Amino acid sequence: MIDCQPSTSGGGEGKSADEIAFELAEGVIQSIIKKIYTDNAHPHLFKRDKKDRLPSLTTVLMQEVDRFNKLLALIHSSMNNLQKAIKGFVVMSEQLEEVYRAFLNNQIWIEHYHPPSYWLSGFYFTQGFLTGTLQTHARKYDLPIDQLKYDFVMQKLFIDQELIKITHDAEKREVASAYGDLTVPLDGVLIHGLFVDAGLFDNLSMTLVDPNPGEINPPLPAVLFLPT
């Protein structure tokens, strides 16, 4: 039904649909960086081991940066092409038309070394991160990676990724207090950002219990992924 509505505003002095979409595209262009640069990455990320190998998680990080840079490039390319299409310089393709309508419908670790806990649901390729963690453990103890598996140790602390983002934006650096009183493990990695379906994790009894009424997908606390 939204798509059937007129695409111009009703008021005589209101902006046209083209003007609204153009300004929204410009806002995206101005507010989103064009690329993540690795020039100012923490030097420990590239510290090689005695066999001259980069840390496995550094490889994972670089792959994530590469994927995210491709996404950023696509966003900027789409916004620039949308503005050109609105101005009539290029043809409004079906994809650009979808972006245009979405605007009108209002549907809109690299500098500070390793964080205390990783936001697992923020990864593009989760399997790469998990494999990289096993690889790190295998190299540390000179073990064959194909003999390793994960044990999962639940923590009591719930981590709010939005709070971490707000703290990062304000301080422009990694702030350990944003992760609560988590202790960085000697082995394995702490992760957060997972949710429970049809249940609730009680951090007092450290067990799964029935969910609260109306609570569909409550969060899990931080979890230690421990290679063994």
Image (cartoon, grey):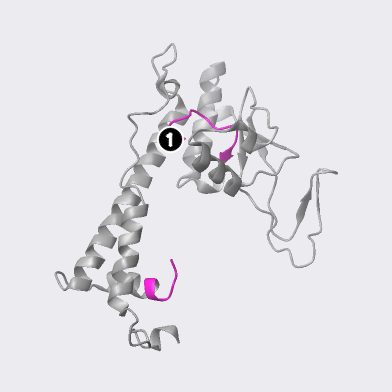
Q: Secondary structure at mark 1?
A: helix
Q: Residue 190's image quarter?
A: top right
Prevailing secondary structure of the magenta residues = loop
Q: Is residue 220 above or below residue 85?
A: above
Residue 222 visible in image: yes
Horizontal side, residue 21 vs residue 177: left or right: left
| Rendering coords of residue 80 (x, y %) | 24, 61
| Rendering coords of residue 82 (x, y %) | 25, 67
Amino acid, disc 1: Leu
Q: Is residue 47 above or below residue 165?
A: above
Extreme-left residue of the structure: 89
Q: Residue 10's image quarter?
A: bottom left
| Rendering coords of residue 131 (x, y %) | 51, 35
Horizontal side, residue 195 vs residue 121: left or right: right
Q: Nearer the viewer, residue 187 or 143?
A: 187
Q: Is residue 5 above or below residue 64?
A: below
For disc 1, the marked residue is: 61
Q: Nearer the viewer, residue 181 or 52?
A: 181
Magenta range is: 103-118
Quadrant where the C terminus sits is top right
Q: Nearer the viewer, residue 27 or 41?
A: 27
Q: What residue lies at 39% left-to-right and 72% top-to-bottom? A: 102
Extreme-right residue of the structure: 205
Horizontal side, residue 87 vs residue 38: left or right: left
Magenta span includes 10: no
- How packed mark 1 is, by other alpha carbons closer than 10 Å (few <14, some 14-19, many 20 or more), is many
| Rendering coords of residue 67 (x, y %) | 36, 45
Q: What residue lies at 81% left-to-right and 43% top-to-bottom? A: 206
Q: How many marks?
A: 1
Q: Is residue 118 above or below residue 71?
A: above
Q: Nearer the viewer, residue 57 or 100?
A: 100
